[in-house]
Image (tube, rainbow, N blue to C red):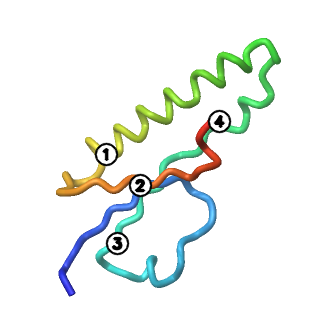
Amino acid sequence: MAFLEVDIVAYGGLDPHTAVLENSSIRIHKMPQWPTSVRNLPKILRPLMLMLKPIVQFFLLLWYICMKIPSPNVFIVQVHALTLPF
């Protein structure tokens, strides 16, 4: 088996499987969630927040990939299907 080091960049939520947590070759970087206080804003600002959220998430992910984790040889991206608008 080849020795690989894996960095996982993801939003928090459920904890990963214990085998993933205990593996010393896997490092998990949890990005902060979008604040829930945004839901309490007036309805007139909700369209603005809907446009702002993916922009903020994009730059946050870019920050983690470019600055926070060591430079990888390979990127593998997994997108949850429910997060994509149809």
Please state the horizontal and vertical placement of residue 35, each as a whole percent of the image.
Answer: 65, 37
3D distance between C-alphas at marks 3 and 1: 15 Å
Q: Quadrant of residue 15?
A: bottom right
Q: Secondary structure at mark 4?
A: loop
Q: Is residue 51 above or below residue 37?
A: above
**Taking 61 as reference, is 11 above or below it?**
below
Q: Which residue is mark 1?
A: 65
Q: Are marks 4 and 3 in contact (CB under 8 Å)?
A: no
* Identity of the residue furthest to the bottom in this view: 1
Report the residue at 28% width, 53% height from top. 75
First reached walking from the N terminus: tag 3 or tag 1: 3
Residue 18 spot, x, y in % from top left: 51, 82
Give the spatial CA distance, label 1 vs label 2: 8 Å
Q: CA distance from mark 1 to mark 4?
A: 27 Å
Quadrant containing the C terminus is top right
Looking at the picture, which amino acid does disc 3 mark? Ile
Residue 38: percent from left, percent from top: 71, 29
Alpha-carbon span between mark 3 and mark 2 = 11 Å
Of labels 4 and 2, the one closer to you: 4
Q: Amino acid at mark 1?
A: Ile
Disc number lying in front (1 or 4): 4
Query: Is 30 placed left or right of 35 in the picture?
Result: left
Q: CA distance from mark 4 to mark 2?
A: 25 Å
The amino acid sitting under disc 4 is: Phe
Crowding near the residue tagged with mark 1, few <14, some 14–19, many ≥20 C-alpha atoms within 10 Å: some
Residue that numbered label 2 is attached to: 9
The numbered dot on residue 86 is 4
The residue sitting at 44% across, 34% down in the picture is 58
Distance of label 4 from label 3 (alpha carbons): 33 Å
**Which residue type carries mark 2?**
Val
